[in-house]
Image (cartoon, coloured by chain):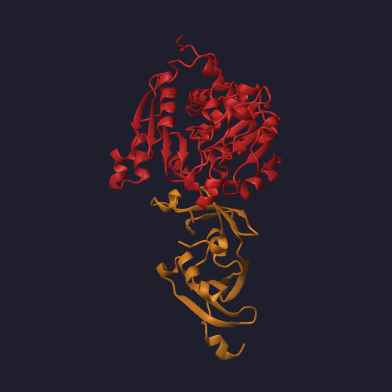
Amino acid sequence: MNRSVITLANLSKDKILYLIKMSEEFERHPNRRILEGKIVATLFFEPSTRTRLSFETAANRLGARVIGFTDPKVTSSTKGETLHDTIKMVSNYADVIVMRHYLEGAAQYASEITEIPIINAGDGSNQHPSQTMLDLYSIYKTQGHLDNLHIYLVGDLKYGRTVHSLLMAMRHFNPTFHFIAPKELEMPEEYKIYCKNNQINFVEHTNFNEDIIADADILYMTRVQKERFTDLMEYERVKDSFILSNHMLRKAKDNLKILHPLPRLKEINMDVDSNPHAYYFEQAHNGVFARQALICDVLNISLEEIINDKTIIN
Amino acid sequence: MNNKEEMKVSALRDGTVIDHIPSNKLMAVVNLLNLEHVNAPVTVGYNLKSKKMGKKSLIKIANRFFTDEEINQLSVVSPNVTLSTIRNYEVVEKKQVKMPDDLLGIVHCANPKCITNNEPMKTLFHVVDKEKGILKCHYCEKEQYLETAKLI
């Protein structure tokens, strides 16, 4: 059976909690030789330095060797080679393939043409499961659990795939979501239907201020990008309405943490960075542990083996 | 039926009659069943009179029988098509097409950024709502309506 990770949307509650436990073990002991002798291929058909470095760090800290490319311009795909042939070729060399692609469904297709497990590191605007995994792990780590949380999603809720994936992965944990977005970028109807079908509570807000966010456990900020707007006057009108500043956190709950998939532009004022509620840089750090868990899971290494691992380097 | 009516389409000894095809979908049915490449005699009736439909088309294929899977593909172009299996001039079975759970290699994905529009590969759709005819691409996960879907 191919153990590829293409999306987290279909994972059971138990599997999600299992992967979180695994991430926890890796945070406790990130440096090991458990993947010694394994080769991880990172195929980035679209550049994404942050995701690639995180995956490569995860693999390297477990003793694996990494091959791959960081820029499709240097590969045969510019000569017209099909994705099919590239995957077939790399399958001869690697034990697991981490791939980023600008086309939607590319990772799913790749997983059907090779026996080697594929980890989707982003396929166009479709899925980005390792980001979702690190979001879940960050929420779990900062709140101590995933249950009954008030999660505020702010910014681009229309195109932001990370918020869609998070919404779907959280369905097992009775969350209440709060959607805060400009009209043009509001949560698409299909996800509201998804919420209704899965008994996920959600509230929509039009304003973003300290009173609205006073009940939040998690404030998940995303970029509001100019190029997403068809109406540039609308962009000018709203661009400053979805910015988080330090003074807006006066009424925040003690346990509130602010997440952001990064890179951040102006949507979080720099004066928030030193606030203890700010968590976005640690969140990125958690990505290494979450990716270590995903790599080991697709290679059929169990949580038990990781707990009893004799290859830990202190 | 008088003799003149009968002469429009010759009788079939063994084979399949596909009836009640909307005339504008005739070529789509021919393509879907790959009838251009069969050796057996094929009789096509175009714009025939129909009590139910006004005008209809039908296809008779001699010595050829279809699996349910092949037949159900037709529901994509025309959900009301009927099929009769003929043996020794007798109708031995009449079937209505059913919408299948999956459509393999039949319709295009409407998403230009879908891998299926950029690789030499077959498309695959899951029929998520048979009544409304909503298809979900197995690859890019985008949904589209069967009504507006483009056939391959």
In this rendering, the answer to whether A212 lies above or below A296 is below
In this rendering, the answer to whether A286 lies above or below B144 is above
Give the side of residue B100 with respect to residue B35, left or right: right
Q: Percent x, y for residue B5?
A: 57, 88
In this rendering, the answer to whether A167 lies above or below A137 is below
Q: Percent x, y for residue A37?
A: 38, 21
Q: Quadrant of residue B36?
A: bottom left
Q: Which of B62 and B30 lies nearest the eye of the viewer?
A: B30
Q: Percent x, y for residue A140?
A: 62, 25
Q: Which of A6 and A279 lies nearest the eye of the viewer?
A: A279
Which chain gets the orange colouring?
B
Q: Which of A72 and B46 lies nearest the eye of the viewer?
A: A72
Q: Quadrant of the N terminus of chain B?
A: bottom right
Give the side of residue B95 with respect to residue A174, left or right: left
Q: Percent x, y for residue B126?
A: 56, 52
Q: Which hue belongs to chain A?
A: red
Q: Is residue A196 visible?
A: yes
Which residue is pictured at 62% across the width and 33% down the height?
A12
Q: Quadrant of the C terminus of chain B?
A: bottom left
Which residue is pictured at 57% across the width and 76% down the height?
B89
Q: Which of A260 and A297 lies nearest the eye of the viewer?
A: A260
Which residue is pictured at 30% across the width and 48% down the height?
A80
- Label count reads 0
Q: Is residue B139 visible?
A: no
